[in-house]
């Protein structure tokens, strides 16, 4: 029983992390129609920035990572996705694939394939007993961090003019421009926010692994993207929920799959994802309203 | 009456004409690289196999305009099936005793194994396609991507059959450059015939204006599924060539990396035409091979150059982005390439 | 006929808009003086929406000039055109459906928070029904309310020129009447209106002048208050043959 509760908490932690990344995917997709596969490499790059700034302490390293991630996201927007603004959604997705590939290989070129290890003293480690169950401190921190970030994001999106305009643009981009919302500003803003979110993901992931490799962020983006699409890219709540469900399921599968099937956790998950895509192409959360193709 | 130079082109069935220039290109490339021998021959062989794979993908994506991210999964399937079917029984019994009896107790000659691989992959594509073809836009891209992940993760974890993530070794090498070139030519011919067939014309009508095509009684979804199955089968054939020329395959060689390679080739040449698939494959192959040599250190124009490891991959990604940003219809602009004589062939351009 | 004086109002000259090979507008000239309500009438596909979209910056004209208050607008992005004091209410209003009514109004770019609050209060004064539902998502509103919200949203920006595209579309006659009655009121407060409509008769009730668009060209320009204006526009619709009144509806 206690093992089950512990695996549930771990599942929540992984789910929270993937949910956060899926939320980033959904946020960006809502505004600019880019299902950005390259967000995974933004996570990786942020982790390398954390590594580069490790001597400056946790705060310094996070500061550096924030700058790097936001600049990278803005550059991506300006150089690739802004010129492609009118391209079909599938083309944008494939283009983001190529961006991810190019960036990952550039990181490989710069840092080599081996793990660069680093640990921050102030990042929590070890386990803690909560009501009789042993949970890793990192899992708890992940849940707290994601919660805080979610609250901040909701505050931004509902409480500030910028946030409301961003949601307006996400609802109807052309109409938002007709009431004065500057397309470039809101697009750049959305990209920048996904950069900030990626730094949090990078912080947790690199602490889990104890360092960074050029493919650190690949798994996160794959599952966050699947989760976001399954949950419904059109609604932020849907995307985040989808990411959470995918992450939590993956975590539960890897702890509870019988030995004979161990390793097939991803296969099962992807099979479920494909099934859900076919049954509810419009997303889990808001089903049935996807436009039928003529 | 046709004048001098037109005569022989005019007697060809029109369905074959778009295949002429791509076929000549592949044949010439195969012969030239084989003549050069050594590393160049290997690079040429690799490029010829990629022609089969990319042309196979273009049978679907080029005619429907729908990008499939699943095809490398089909290549992987074809490669592993061919490998497992051609390996000697004794070898399998010794090295992989846990393999299901169906696979463990048979060893087929390469052509038969390749055909079986094509058929099985075609069935997989038919089943998947029954559902996938109903999706559009991003859902379709993500669903095909999921299919790739599914194949990749099954192959990468089914230790008793595929050796899991480690390389599968000891695959008998049957395919030579000549065979690879012949297969590529057959694939190009098949793609050309498909494009000019009633099915191909309906598909292209659906690509250019889905609403209008549906309005004129075309079952776009059913037609796309047919193209999907055909193109998956030929992708598996490309995989069969890979395993039967390399002798060793591992899941790393497929997956995301090969997907980027294949999509880059298709996009660089031009998604919409057969010529684009072949030109893109040739151009990207030459580019990556050159960069790969710089990576390993080589003499260029009298100077010794050695670039950092990973250069060719970065170049590959950049090539994709440059084309998508500045020439989205690809180097061929989506047109077929006509032979430089006679009116007949000049009319064979694709809109 | 009151032609706009140079430097004031809106002036459209030789406007051409093409979509691929289709020419939606083939050289349209149009003038609007400040304080005027001008109608653009025409059948479906005559180019009314294209004209408004081009003025608002949504589509880039292939040729021609758009000048407002002495500034060239053609080729500007929609948000720049908006900054010059023009605001388009597109067909069916297109309120931001997942935002609440209040958020719809807050999304409009307005200088300063206090100013925004003041203008929102004004908008609620004009449309009291919206105030009651201000916390509801726009997608839950009725068709009439959605059109009201779209208009309110445009008014929050306090444009000097309001561009209305088919405001009557899909609404009941009573609501349409209410909506149209508002326009002269707006004009009296100094907001000019350029309204595209299929309902010829209604347009003539409140507009100062009207243009008839036929196949992307101005077929006729009439003074709405002159006798026989409706017959003249109808003639432009259907050619010179005697028209049957009411068929244009």
Image (spheres, helix red, strand yellow):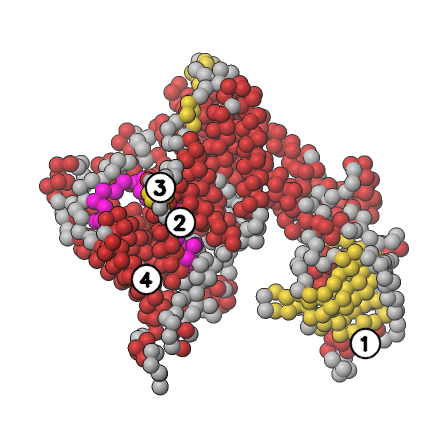
* Range of residues picked out in magenta: B244-270
- Please check whether the numbered discs 4 and 1 fall on a single chain: no
Residue sitting at 75 percent across and 61 percent down?
A: C66
Q: Mark 2 and mark 4: span between their CA atoms?
A: 26 Å
> Badge 2 is on which residue?
B69
Q: Residues within 10 Å of mark 3 (few under 14, many from 20)?
A: few
Q: Residues within 10 Å of mark 2 (few under 14, many from 20)?
A: many
**Which quarter of the picture shows residue C63?**
bottom right
> Badge 4 is on which residue?
B25
Q: Mark 1 and mark 2: span between their CA atoms?
A: 60 Å
Q: Is residue C38 above or below residue A126?
A: below
Q: Earlier in the sequence, mark 3 or mark 2?
A: 2
Q: Mark 3 and mark 2: span between their CA atoms?
A: 39 Å
Q: Mark 3 and mark 4: span between their CA atoms?
A: 31 Å
User: Of helix, strand and loop, which mostly describes the magenta segment?
Assistant: helix
| Letter of the chain that mark 1 sits on in the rendering | C
> Badge 1 is on which residue?
C232
Q: Is residue B211 visible?
A: yes
The image position of residue C64, as x and y in percent, is 72, 65
Q: Earlier in the sequence, mark 2 or mark 4?
A: 4
Q: Residues within 10 Å of mark 4 (few under 14, many from 20)?
A: some
Q: Secondary structure at mark 3?
A: strand
Residue sitting at 18 percent across and 56 percent down?
A: B111
Q: Residues within 10 Å of mark 1 (few under 14, many from 20)?
A: some
> Badge 3 is on which residue?
B304
Q: Is residue C166 above or below residue B251?
A: below
Q: Are marks 2 and 4 in contact (CB under 8 Å)?
A: no
Q: Secondary structure at mark 1?
A: helix
| Letter of the chain that mark 3 sits on in the rendering | B
């Amino acid at each position: 029983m206690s093992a089950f509760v512990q695996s549930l908490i771990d599942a929540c932690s992984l789910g929270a992390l993937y949910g956060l990344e899926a939320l980033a995917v959904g946020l960006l997709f809502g505004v600019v129609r880019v299902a950005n596969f390259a967000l995974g490499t933004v996570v990786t790059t942020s982790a390398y920035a954390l590594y580069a700034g490790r001597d400056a302490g946790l705060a310094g390293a996070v500061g550096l990572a924030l700058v790097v991630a936001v600049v990278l996201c803005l550059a991506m927007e300006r150089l690739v996705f802004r010129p492609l603004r009118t391209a079909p959604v599938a083309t944008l997705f494939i283009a983001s694939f190529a961006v991810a590939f190019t960036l990952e290989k550039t990181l490989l070129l710069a840092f080599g394939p081996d793990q660069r290890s680093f640990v921050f003293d102030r990042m929590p480690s070890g386990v803690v007993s909560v009501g009789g169950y042993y949970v890793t401190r990192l899992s708890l921190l992940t849940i707290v961090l994601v919660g805080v970030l979610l609250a901040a994001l909701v505050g931004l999106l509902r409480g500030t003019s910028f946030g409301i305009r961003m949601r307006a643009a996400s609802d109807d981009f052309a109409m938002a421009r007709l009431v004065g919302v500057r397309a470039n500003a809101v697009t750049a803003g959305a990209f920048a926010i996904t950069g900030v979110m990626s730094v949090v993901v990078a912080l947790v992931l690199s602490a889990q692994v104890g360092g960074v490799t050029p493919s650190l962020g690949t798994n996160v983006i794959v599952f966050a993207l699947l989760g976001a699409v399954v949950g419904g890219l059109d609604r932020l709540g849907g995307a985040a929920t989808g990411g959470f469900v995918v992450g939590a399921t993956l975590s539960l599968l890897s702890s509870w799959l019988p030995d004979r099937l161990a390793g097939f956790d991803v296969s099962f998950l992807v099979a479920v994802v494909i099934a859900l895509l076919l049954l509810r192409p419009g997303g889990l959360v808001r089903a049935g309203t996807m436009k039928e193709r003529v | 009456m046709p004048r001098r130079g037109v005569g022989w082109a005019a007697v060809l069935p029109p369905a074959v004409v778009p295949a002429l220039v791509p076929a000549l290109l592949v044949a010439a490339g195969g012969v030239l690289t084989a003549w050069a021998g050594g590393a160049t021959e290997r690079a040429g062989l690799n490029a010829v196999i990629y022609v089969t794979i990319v042309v196979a993908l273009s049978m679907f994506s080029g005619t429907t305009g729908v990008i499939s991210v699943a095809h490398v999964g089909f290549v992987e399937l074809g490669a592993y099936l061919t490998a497992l079917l051609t390996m000697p029984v004794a070898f399998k019994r010794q090295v992989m005793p846990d393999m299901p009896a169906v696979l463990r107790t048979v060893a087929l000659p390469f052509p038969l194994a390749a055909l079986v691989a094509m058929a099985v992959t075609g069935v997989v594509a038919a089943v998947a396609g029954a559902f996938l073809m109903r999706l559009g836009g991003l859902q379709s891209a993500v669903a095909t991507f999921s299919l790739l992940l599914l194949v990749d993760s099954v192959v990468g974890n089914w230790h008793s059959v595929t050796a899991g993530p480690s390389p599968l070794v000891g695959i008998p090498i049957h395919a030579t450059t000549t065979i690879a070139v012949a297969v590529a030519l057959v694939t190009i011919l098949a793609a050309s015939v498909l494009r000019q067939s009633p099915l191909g014309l309906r598909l292209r009508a659906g690509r250019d204006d889905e609403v209008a095509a549906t309005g004129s009684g075309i079952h776009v979804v059913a037609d796309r599924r047919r193209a999907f199955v055909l193109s998956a089968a030929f992708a598996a054939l490309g995989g069969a060539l890979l395993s039967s020329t390399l002798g060793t395959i591992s899941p790393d060689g497929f997956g995301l990396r090969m997907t980027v390679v294949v999509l880059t080739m298709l996009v660089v040449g031009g998604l919409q035409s057969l010529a684009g698939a072949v030109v893109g494959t040739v151009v990207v192959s030459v580019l990556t091979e050159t960069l790969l040599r710089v990576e390993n250190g080589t003499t260029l124009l009298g100077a010794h150059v050695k670039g950092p490891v990973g250069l060719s991959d970065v170049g590959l990604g950049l090539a994709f982005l440059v084309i998508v940003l500045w020439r989205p219809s690809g180097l061929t602009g989506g047109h077929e390439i006509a032979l430089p004589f006679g009116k007949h062939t000049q009319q064979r351009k694709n809109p | 006929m009151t032609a706009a004086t140079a430097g004031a109002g809106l002036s459209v000259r030789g406007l051409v808009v093409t979509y691929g090979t289709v020419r939606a507008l083939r050289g349209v000239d149009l003038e609007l003086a400040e304080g005027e309500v001008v109608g653009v009438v025409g059948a479906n596909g005559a180019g009314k929406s294209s004209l408004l979209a081009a003025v608002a910056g949504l589509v880039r004209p292939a040729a021609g000039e758009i000048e407002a208050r002495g500034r060239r607008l053609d080729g500007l992005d929609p948000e720049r055109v908006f900054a010059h004091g023009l605001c388009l209410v597109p067909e069916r209003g297109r309120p931001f459906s997942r935002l609440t009514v209040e958020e719809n109004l807050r999304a409009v770019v307005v200088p300063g928070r206090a100013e925004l609050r003041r203008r929102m209060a004004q908008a609620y004064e004009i449309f009291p029904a919206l105030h009651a539902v201000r916390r509801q998502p726009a997608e839950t509103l009725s068709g009439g309310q959605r059109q009201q919200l779209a208009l309110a949203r445009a008014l929050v920006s306090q444009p000097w020129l309001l561009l209305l595209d088919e405001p009557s579309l899909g609404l009941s006659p009573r609501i349409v009447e209410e909506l149209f009655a508002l326009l002269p009121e707006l004009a009296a407060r100094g907001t000019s209106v350029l309204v595209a409509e299929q309902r010829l008769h209604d347009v003539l009730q409140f507009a100062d002048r009207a243009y008839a668009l036929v196949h992307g060209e101005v077929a006729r320009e009439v003074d709405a208050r002159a006798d026989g204006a409706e017959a003249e526009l109808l003639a432009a619709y259907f050619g010179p043959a005697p028209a049957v009144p009411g068929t244009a509806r």
